Image: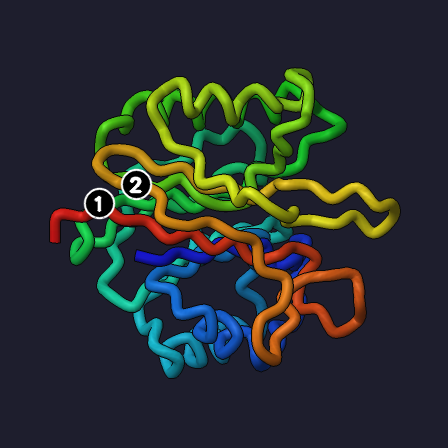
Amino acid sequence: MKLVAWNVNHRATGKAIPPTMAEALSFLEPDVIVLTEYVPSRSHVEFCAALSLNGFPNFLVTPFTPKENHVLIASRTEVWRGDIQAPPIAPSVPSNFLHVHLPDHQVDVLGIRVPDYSKTPPFRHACWDWIETIAATFAGRPFVLIGDLNVDPSYPTSKCGNRLRNLTSLGWQHALPPEGVSYWPLVGNVGRKLDHAFVSGPLNIVDAKYIWEAGPYCYGGRNAGAMSDHAVLVVEIGGFNN
């Protein structure tokens, strides 16, 4: 099973979705697509239609919250909305987490974007406290946590750098690409690994990588032709019973 997670850089503004985005996602041949920092604006209907045409007829998005980012999850197979809901730590939190169940694979997926609370650290830590509670509750089950966690492994504890290690200590496997980064800031030459995936239960990691360009598509970068400022995280997992 292959999953892709991608921060599409809408920045809560409802940017127009590039007409080739659905085709570009399909080019990577995933089974599941997790889009973060997504806003269902005027091009949402056309984009979902394009996803369906490209092999992803099943999709869910977090309930619409004005002036906030959302998470969209699309699948080749049936997808059910899950029961896990993020607490109202701040207005931007609930719409940035989406729990789904994939009955054909018997696996749960929690699509995540931890809102960037760099100016209000207590909110960031509260989000991570909740994520760790979920991780402790569902460790041992076929489960995937995936998305923009807004944490680089090099970050200090004050910026939640320890939280990634906390998840592994709870028994989750970190699908961390061995090379590259997922985000380059507009200024400076220090890239960051902000997009991550963790798997639990009988699942195992087959491959993980960041993709900036593939075929004719430029997924991320600082040039005008890039569709986002993040790379796509591509994770392949095994260990399914069916």
| Residue, far left | 242
Circle 1: residue type: Gly
Residue at 67 percent across and 27 percent down: it is 154
Say whether residue 188 is left or right of residue 13: right
Camera sees residue 64: no
Residue at 33 percent across and 63 percent down: it is 31
Say whether residue 199 is left or right of residue 234: left
Say whether residue 203 is left or right of residue 116: left
> Callout 2: 10 Å neighbours few (<14), some, many (20+)?
some
Q: Quadrant of residue 121?
A: top right
Circle 2: residue type: Asn
Q: Given contact means CB atoms under 8 Å apart, are the residues at marks 2 and 1 in contact?
A: yes
Where residue 185 appears, as percent x and y from the top left, is: 79, 48
Residue at 36 percent across and 60 percent down: it is 32
User: Residue 30 or 93: which is nearer the viewer?
Assistant: 30
| Numbered label attached to residue 239 | 1
User: Residue 177 or 226: which is nearer the viewer?
Assistant: 177
Q: CA distance from mark 2 to mark 1?
A: 6 Å
Task: Give above or below for 178 relative to 123.
Answer: below
User: Residue 14 or 125: which is nearer the viewer?
Assistant: 125
Find disc 2 in the rendering and name its residue. Answer: 204
Q: Quadrant of the C terminus?
A: bottom left
Q: Quadrant of residue 169?
A: top left
> Callout 1: 10 Å neighbours few (<14), some, many (20+)?
few
Query: The residue tagged with tag 1: helix, strand or loop?
Result: loop
Say whether residue 86 is left or right of residue 191: left
| Residue, far right | 187
